[in-house]
Image: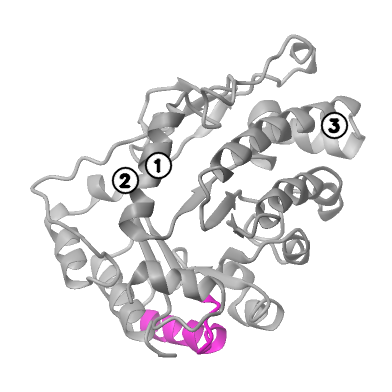
Amino acid sequence: MGLVEDTAKAMRFQKPERIPVHFGLNPSCWFHYDQRALQDLMERHRYLFPGFRRRERVEPPLPPEQRADSPARDCWGCVWRTTEAGITGQVVEHPLADWSAFDGYRPPDADTCDGRWSCDWDAKRRQFEAAKRRNGYTSASLRHGHTFLQLCDLRGYENLMLDMADGEPRLDALVEMVERFNTALVERMLRWRPDHFAFPEDLGMQVGPMLMPEHFRRYIKPVYRRMMSRVRDVGIMVSMHSDGDIRTLAEDLLEVGVGCLNIQDLVNGIDWIRDHLKGRVCVDLDVDRQNTVRFGTPAEIDALIRYEAEQLGSPEGGLMFRVDMYPGIPLENVAALMDALEKYSTMWS
């Protein structure tokens, strides 16, 4: 059984052979680390990187929002900028920063836009079908930041917070516009019959959520419920990603049908995740990249992964590890993390 099979079983509590580990390198890593050293590590950790093939030089393809010093306007009219190649930038021009622009504003066409950039849906469908033939298990996903963050991109974060606090009547129409577009994407991808459907969107800060829980329940949660119901009603697993502290929103996310929750470990607390989520949802654990992994010793990294596997894992499944690696972590710590993840992935086998 490989990573794909382990993932499918872990999500549904069907006794995977190992705790699945999804280890991703942010594209910026290839510009900051010695590429030979990175590839040496990948070659030594075949469970983490199945099918890895060494290359003379890695030139990761970068979407527009990750191209340094090259501002790009997306399908919604938001202008993205980053100063670091490979790091997703931020929106620096909000097309609806002033409500006076709303009456004449038109959303993008879901037939030609994937939610951020123009796309060829026939080509995407063919890629999906090829992946299904290759792996037997497939996933579909809305873009990261599909609803709440899309509203932030359109209005600006501070403006949006004031809209919610003031009960701005035009906000309901804007939310409906974003939902209508996203629902069209969901319906299109459901026709492909994926095995699971992801709704990635950051809702948390370092401490607490980015918006008040009552505002989440008023404006965002009903949208989540309606979109996710379309997926669950045809028997497809719903997964959700959020960075940050989302403890005050976790119950809401389970209520709307999230079956697999990608949540950060130390920001939310390993013991809190164990006490409130273990066994109720598949915990797709986003492994620390701010504290222990960045500044700790290899022994401390090993102890962290072991504790997480002990506290959150079980023979039935319901736990996955996910790593998004960024520059700044010493390579000896990267190696220790990879070693620990492979070692403790078999704890419940």
Q: Label 1 is placed on what type of residue?
A: Ile
Gap in Å between the C-alphas at discs 2 and 1?
A: 6 Å
Q: Of the residues tagged 2 and 3, which is closer to the observer?
A: 3
Of the image marks 1 and 3, the number of the one nearer the N terminus: 1
Query: Residue at image x 50%, y 89%?
Result: 315
Query: Residue at image x 78%, y 63%?
Result: 255
Q: Position of residue 347 (x, y in %)?
A: 41, 90
> Which residue lies under the disc numbered 2?
28
Magenta span: 300-319
Query: Residue at image x 76%, y 47%?
Result: 226
**Label 2 residue SS:** loop
> Which residue lies under the disc numbered 1?
87
Q: Residue 138 lies in what quarter of the image? A: bottom left
The magenta stretch spans residue 316: yes
> Which residue lies under the disc numbered 3?
172
Q: Residue 68 lies in what quarter of the image? A: top left
Q: Label 3 is placed on what type of residue?
A: Asp
Whether residue 101 is visible to the viewer of this picture, yes or no, is yes
Gap in Å between the C-alphas at discs 2 and 3?
A: 38 Å
**Most foreground residue, 332 or 308:** 308
**Label 1 residue SS:** loop
Q: Label 2 is placed on what type of residue?
A: Ser
**Label 3 residue SS:** helix
